[in-house]
Image: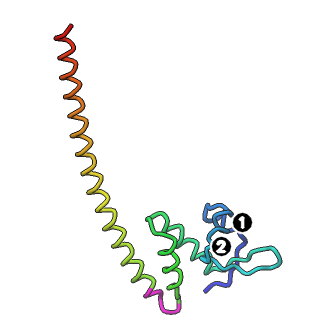
């Protein structure tokens, strides 16, 4: 593991994330920088954790799920537990998305039906109004 350290502005710049977001993840216990006076010193592990959080967010993981994965981080074991857990979470997320897609398709069909009924009702109403005029 690299002994390189980073300031909050280094991580912010490198990972294109606000310092406020980094502090939020720290408050949530997902990052644990050292303190030198008021300055935060982030480790390579913090950087890996932050990358994992950002990737997790992009694919729809909750902060709790990100926390689980971070807690499993263990480069000495080749991260076997973390990778296995991540694969399970990916499969779960994929299943959720598939269900959401089905739900969206069903909703679109219902919208089509409602739209068709409204258009038919308007046509009937317009025809009745034209006959009365």
Q: Position of residue 8 (x, y in %)?
A: 71, 69
Q: Nearer the viewer, residue 121 or 82?
A: 121
| Residue position for label 2 | 27
Alpha-carbon distance for marks 1 and 2?
Answer: 17 Å
| Residue position for label 1 | 9
Mark 1: secondary structure: helix
Left or right? Give the position of 132 relative to 55: left
Mark 2: secondary structure: helix
Q: Is residue 59 above or below residue 48?
A: above
Quadrant including the C terminus:
top left
Disc 1 residue crowd, few under 14, some 14–19, many 20+, Cα 10 Å: some
Question: Which residue is drawn at the image coordinates 45% and 83% (left, top)?
Answer: 82
Q: Is residue 97 above or below residue 129?
A: below
Q: Residue lying furthest top in this view? A: 133
Q: Residue lying furthest right in this view? A: 37
Question: Which residue is drawn at the image coordinates 50% and 75% (left, top)?
Answer: 64
Q: Nearer the viewer, residue 107 or 87?
A: 107
Q: Is residue 79 magenta?
A: yes
Disc 2 residue crowd, few under 14, some 14–19, many 20+, Cα 10 Å: few
Q: Position of residue 131 (x, y in %)?
A: 16, 11
Question: Which residue is drawn at the image coordinates 50% and 85% (left, top)?
Answer: 72
Tell me where residue 110 sits by quadrant: top left
- Main SS category, magenta section: helix
Chain part drawn in magenta:
76-81
Left or right? Give the position of 106 relative to 47: left
The tally of labels here is 2
Q: Position of residue 83 (x, y in %)?
A: 42, 82
Question: Which residue is drawn at the image coordinates 52% and 71% (left, top)?
Answer: 63
Q: Residue lying furthest bottom in this view? A: 77
């Amino acid at each position: 593991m690299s002994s390189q350290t980073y300031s909050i502005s280094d991580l912010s710049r490198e990972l294109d994330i606000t310092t406020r977001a980094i502090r939020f993840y720290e408050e949530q216990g997902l990052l644990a920088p050292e303190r030198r006076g008021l300055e935060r010193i982030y480790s390579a592990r913090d950087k890996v954790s932050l990358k994992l959080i950002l990737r997790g967010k992009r694919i729809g993981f909750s902060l709790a799920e990100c926390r689980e994965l971070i807690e499993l981080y263990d480069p000495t074991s080749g991260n076997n537990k973390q990778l296995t857990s991540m694969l399970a979470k990916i499969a779960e997320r994929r299943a959720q998305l598939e269900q959401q897609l089905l739900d969206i398709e069903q909703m679109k069909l219902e919208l089509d039906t409602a739209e068709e009924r409204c258009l038919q009702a308007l046509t009937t109403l317009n025809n009745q109004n034209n006959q009365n005029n």
